[in-house]
Image (spheres, rainbow, N blue to C red):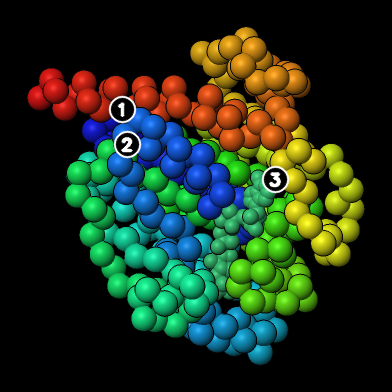
Amino acid sequence: MSIKHPIIAVTGSSGAGTSTVKNSFDHIFRREKITPAVIEGDSMHKYDRTEMKKVITDAEAKNAEHLPTHFGPENNLLPELAEIFRAYGETGRGKRRFYLHNEQEAAPYGQQPGTFTPWEEFPEHTDLLFYEGLHGAYVGDEADVVQHADLAIGVVPVVNLEWIQKIHRDTEGRGYSVEAVTHTILRRMHDYVNHICPQFSRTHINFQRVPIVDTSNPFISRDIPTLDESLVVIRFRDYHGIDFPYLLNMIHDSFMSRPNCIVVPGGKMGLSMELVLSPIILDMMEKKWKRSSSK
Ligand SMILES: Nc1ncnc2c1ncn2[C@@H]1O[C@H](COP(=O)(O)OP(=O)(O)O)[C@@H](O)[C@H]1O
Ligand SMILES: O=C(COP(=O)(O)O)[C@H](O)[C@H](O)COP(=O)(O)O
């Protein structure tokens, strides 16, 4: 946790929509002239695509009970991620890299898809660290990542929708077959339950998109349910101080489902995120700037 150099961690499973949610944060950052240092969670994978395939193949040859996955702590640099958070919170500095998922991402670097870019310094003079990925609220034997996050957000669509989104993105954008993506989902189930899901009990706010159309068989769904074909449950771990009357007034057709949960129409997800997150982020920045001016 840091007033001088705040850290926002957006966590979601693969295909949950964290990259998409980043757009809402970008609107807030642009409007409030906030410069984030961005780090993507898949840059903290331990292995590149070729190495990971070998790790999996070797485990299959040994009839391992649980096959290695990108969700598991043993295949990610989580102590290093916690250290990046800690150091940024203290100094506003640090290093990052990128994982290049496809040709489009890899071309600017002259590298192959499935590889990491070299480590580089965060840009200078950033106002906060913004993480989006699989392990922003992770706590385990290896590392406690979430302790360093000032604001931990969960992006947690109901799982049938998450699988539809992942299948759509991985087939359309990463060249995988539906069968290969389905196999990956199955292989990751143990680590999903034990390492991804527990994080959403630690996050300050979760955004859970719920489709109101049939997603009974996500493995044959042709399209991703649109925003207007869904609702969003916004859950606050600590709802004291949240101005629900204001949100209910500003977000048409919203309603409270529990004292800590407001439900909004899917089409209002972007507006709702900005209404909920802007005051929190602005408060962070006010404390930061007050502290730096009082030095
Ligand atoms: N709110 C949303 N409405 C419609 N499609 C979405 C939404 N959020 C994500 N998607 C789609 O789901 C897929 C996965 O989203 P992405 O942001 O890449 O997930 P992640 O980065 O968490 O793996 C993408 O095809 C994206 O367009
Ligand atoms: O799933 C993820 C991360 O979740 P997401 O990128 O969906 O947020 C892995 O980074 C990719 O699967 C990498 O594996 P591959 O090299 O097979 O693409």
Position of residue 99 measured from the top left corner of the image (x, y, whole percent): 44, 69
Would you say residue 47 is visible in this rendering? no
Q: Nearer the viewer, residue 77 or 17?
A: 17
Q: Identify the secondary structure beneath mark 1.
A: helix
Task: Look at 68% across and 23% down and name the residue there.
Answer: 262
The quarter of the rendered structure image containing the N terminus is: top left
Which residue, given by chain and number where applicable, does mark 3 sit on?
157
Q: In the rendered structure, which amino acid carries the disc numbered 1?
A: Met
Which residue, given by chain and number where applicable, does mark 2 sit on?
34
Name, please, the residue furthest toward the top. 245
Count the labels in the image. Answer: 3
Whether disc 2's CB lies below 8 Å from ligand 1 is answered no
Q: Nearer the viewer, residue 166 or 265?
A: 265
Q: In the rendered structure, which amino acid carries the disc numbered 2?
A: Ile
State yes or no: discs 1 and 2 in contact (Cβ < 8 Å): yes
Mark 1 or mark 3, which is nearer the start of the sequence? 3
Which label number is shown at residue 285? 1
Would you say residue 39 is visible in this rendering? yes
State left or right for residue 109 relative to residue 154.
Answer: left
